[in-house]
Structure formats: C-alpha cells, structure tokens
Image (cartoon, rainbow, N blue to C red):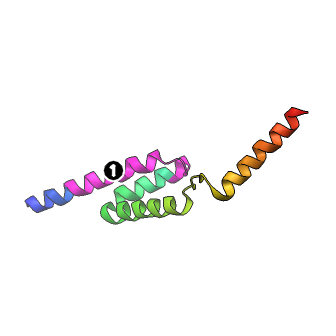
Amino acid sequence: MEILYIILLLAIILNVFVSISTFRRDDFDKGQKIAQVVLIWIIPFVAAIGIWIFHRSFDDSYKPKKPSRGGEDADAFDMRKHNNHEHFGD
C-alpha cells in the first residue's frame, strides 16, 4: 500500500512541475497551455513525460543562436558601424 502512495506522490510532483513549466512558456497561447495541462492531469505519467519531452525538443530546435565574437557576424557589424560613421561624418 505504501508503494501506491509513493507512486501517487511522484505523479503529483511530476504533474505540478510540468504544469508550471507549461504555463511559464511564451511560445504557446493560453488555449494551447490549458489543453496541455488538462492532458497532463488526465493522463498522469504518459502525458506529463510526453509534453515535457515535446517542450525540450521544441526548445532545442528553436533556440536562438548567440552571436559570435568573430567571423561573419562581427564583419557585418563592423560594416554597419563603418557605414553609419560615413553618413554622419559628411
């Protein structure tokens, strides 16, 4: 009987964690967030883990890249800076 309580407690903790994580996301609208949280609580382990994996894969796919300090990005920035000084210097 104790194992059942432990499993139930783990499901509640997992559901709360993924529900909070879902509501903090900026990339879904309110309706999508509500639908995901409803699924999390209706199908405890499967939906919570599945939605959490979905969010992780979504973050990995659409994570903005940090600009580098060298290479092409730096050259483009220097060119814009140079062009701005040219126009203001006249």
Which quadrant is home to the C terminus?
A: top right
Q: x%, y% of residue 55?
A: 46, 59
Which quadrant is home to the N terminus?
A: bottom left
Figure disc tally: 1
Residue 65 on the magenta segment: no
- Outermost residue on the top side: it is 89
Q: Is residue 58 above or below residue 26?
A: below
Circle 1 SS class: helix
Left or right: residue 66 compared with residue 54: right
Q: Is residue 16 above or below residue 90?
A: below
Left or right: residue 2 compared with residue 29: left
Q: Which residues are magenta?
A: 9-32
Using the image as rendered, state which of residue 84 and residue 15 is in the foreground: 84
In the image, what residue occupies the spot 48% across and 51% down?
Answer: 33
Q: Is residue 79 above or below residue 3?
A: above
- Outermost residue on the left side: it is 1
Question: The disc labelled 1 sits on which kind of residue?
Answer: Phe
Q: Is residue 74 above or below residue 45?
A: above
Using the image as rendered, state which of residue 52 and residue 8 is in the foreground: 52
State the predominant SS element of the stretch in magenta. Answer: helix
Q: x%, y% of residue 37?
A: 41, 53
Left or right: residue 6 compared with residue 89: left
In the image, what residue occupies the spot 54% across and 57% down?
Answer: 63
Residue 12 on the magenta segment: yes
Q: x%, y% of residue 4?
A: 14, 61
Q: Residues within 10 Å of mark 1 (few under 14, many from 20)?
A: few
In the image, what residue occupies the spot 87% across and 33% down?
Answer: 89
Instruction: From the image, tell me which residue sits under label 1.
Output: 17
In the image, what residue occupies the spot 56% across and 49% down?
Answer: 29
- Residue 2 occupies which quadrant of the picture? bottom left
